[in-house]
Image (cartoon, helix red, strand yellow):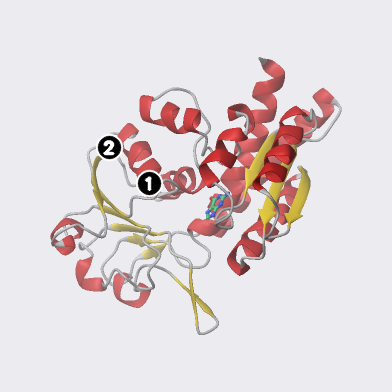
Amino acid sequence: MPAKIIDGKALSLSIREQMKSEAERFETTFGRKVGLAVIKVGANPASEVYVRNKIKACEDVGVRSFSYNLPEEIAESDVMDLIDELNANESVDGILVQLPLPKTINEKKVLARILPEKDADGFHTLNAGGLMLGLPCTKPCTPAGIIELIKSTGVAIAGKNVVVIGRSNIVGKPVAMLLLSENATVTICHSRTVDLKSHTLNADILVVAVGIKEFVTGDMVKDGAVVIDVGMNRADGKLYGDVNYPEAVEKASFITPVPGGVGPMTVTMLIKNTIESAFRCKEN
Ligand code: GUN
């Protein structure tokens, strides 16, 4: 029997409904909307789409967005000045700098400049460290969305063998930490892993975040596995995941489609982080 589809779009919409009322509650209590600043530098085509989706989601939920489209050749110091200004702006609860940045700008320095309490993406060292230590922190959006998607299947995470393919700071490493805190047995595989298939065939839950079109083929998927495909690979005018969907759907019990799986959840978690930051800042 083919896998059940994990509908990230539907799950996103239902979470956004709850967030709408949270955003409204913030506005009635504190007399202003929750605010998210979105900074994009240059004109990366993928970033254009992601940023547009993030701003649209703000509008849908009733969060005010402050959008900055900065030119490719902007000086790093000007980006830092803008972040300082937004850190001090009381109408801004969350700040996000869309990655990747142009090579002339030091990504680590820019991300470190955002106040940890306004770090909507959870990329600041203090938030990354908090995740590692199990302290309260803002969690990165794609990993947090992946956990929600897995939980929506009703399949328990505790005790399961989970294989994560990919070790990026944005997805692979943080999702592994979140899965570990859900009591999974987690293996992180990457480009230097020897005999990848021997690992993936042992995975009750397989999370793929490598950025290579249809990298995981059906023969690499354990029968009945839950497959989460984080890939967004554009080719011949279409979007492809990191998993060969037609093959994997015949092996898995649940699978996320591309598009309509992880992508919408990433955006939803960003808005959730921003609303939570807004309340935290007022209540502390
Ligand atoms: N680039 C790719 N994914 C992300 C993300 O989740 N947040 C930001 N800021 N940039 C990204």
Is the residue marked by circle 2 packed among few (<14), some (14-19), or many (20+) residues within 10 Å?
Answer: some
Front-most of residues 230 and 6 = 230
**Which residue type does callout 1 highlight?**
Gly
Residue holding disc 2: 158
**Residue drawn at 73 percent across, 48 percent down:** 58
Most foreground residue, 68 or 277: 68
Q: Residue furthest bottom?
A: 236
Assign the C terminus to one quadrant of the image: top right
Residue 89 is left or right of residue 227, and the answer is right
Q: Rounded to the nearest whole Å, what is the CA distance between mark 2 and mark 1? A: 12 Å
Name the residue beneath numbered marker 1.
Answer: 154
Q: Could you tell me the amino acid type at mark 2?
A: Ala
User: Residue shown at 38%/58% (left/top)?
Assistant: 209
* Label 2: element kind: loop
Residue 160 coordinates in the image, percent (x, y): 23, 43
Q: Secondary structure at mark 1?
A: loop
Which of 238/112 is in front?
Answer: 112
Evaluate whether residue 59 shows in this view: no
